[in-house]
Image (cartoon, grey):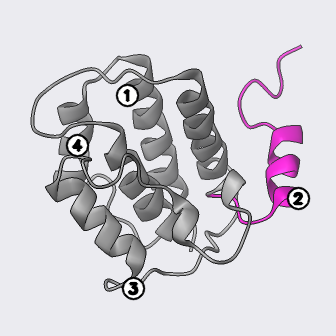
Amino acid sequence: MIDIEKRKLLSEKLRHLISGQIDNLEYDDLEFEGHFDSDDRAVFEVFEQSWFLYDDFKSHKIELSKHDKRVICRWIIFLHSELEYEWPRVSLLSVRSLKVLFYRISSGVFFKSISTDDYLLGDKSIWPFYRKYDYDLALKNPKFLANIA
């Protein structure tokens, strides 16, 4: 199920977060207030990954490397695609879930980063896209600035 409105909202707020228009707590509050509640797994999964971009104990603007900004841009491109999120669900007792738990509890001491590396299928280098073909197609048919000439 694709929730276009929630995907657009999450995409917009991610852009605001990485550009410094909003801080981490403003972004996080949107989730607590239910703005990202959706049956669309892409909305849930992308928000979950974005949670690792910042410290949610104090207010701050996030600073990202060029690489991290590109990764987030890929998330935004996916949110604007009309593709279903195809990655398998991760059980609560999975290795990834335990890594996430230890990462959060230890403030990153146990693991320096959390990624999608614990998934077994799909092309991890283009997450949340599942296939390179879909990612390449989305890049060739951009939703932003597509009709400007």
**Real-space Cα separation, disc 3 to disc 4, in angstroms:** 24 Å
Check disc 1: other Cα within 10 Å, few if <14, some if 14-19, many if 20+: many
Q: Are marks 1 and 4 in contact (CB under 8 Å)?
A: no
Could you classify mark 4 by the number of other residues whose Cα lies within 10 Å: few (under 14), some (14-19), or many (20 or more)? some
Rounded to the nearest angstrom, the CA distance separating label 2 from label 4 is: 32 Å
Check if mark 2's residue and mark 4's residue have beta carbons within 8 Å. no
**Residue under numbered circle 1:** 17
In this figure, what is the number of numbered marks? 4
Residue 11 is inside the magenta segment: no
Whole-number angstrom distance, CA of label 1 to CA of label 3:
29 Å
Element under disc 2: helix
Residue tagged 4: 28
Q: Is residue 142 above or below residue 33?
A: above
Depicted 41 relative to depicted 48: above or below:
below
Question: What is the three-letter code of the residue carrying label 1?
Answer: Leu
The residue at 64%/47% (across/down) is 80
Q: Nearer the viewer, residue 43 or 51?
A: 51
Residue at 18% from the left image edge and 34% from the top image edge:
25
Residues shaded magenta: 128-149
Q: For residue 100, which quarter of the picture?
A: bottom left
Name the front one of labels 3 and 4.
3
What residue does disc 3 label? 91
Q: Which residue is mark 2?
A: 133
Is disc 1 in contact with disc 2, using a CB cutoff of under 8 Å? no
Q: Position of residue 120 (x, y in %)?
A: 63, 77
Measured Cα–Cα span from mark 1 to mark 4:
10 Å
Counting residues from the start of the chain, the first of labels 1 and 2 encountered is: 1
Is 86 above or below relative to 42?
A: below
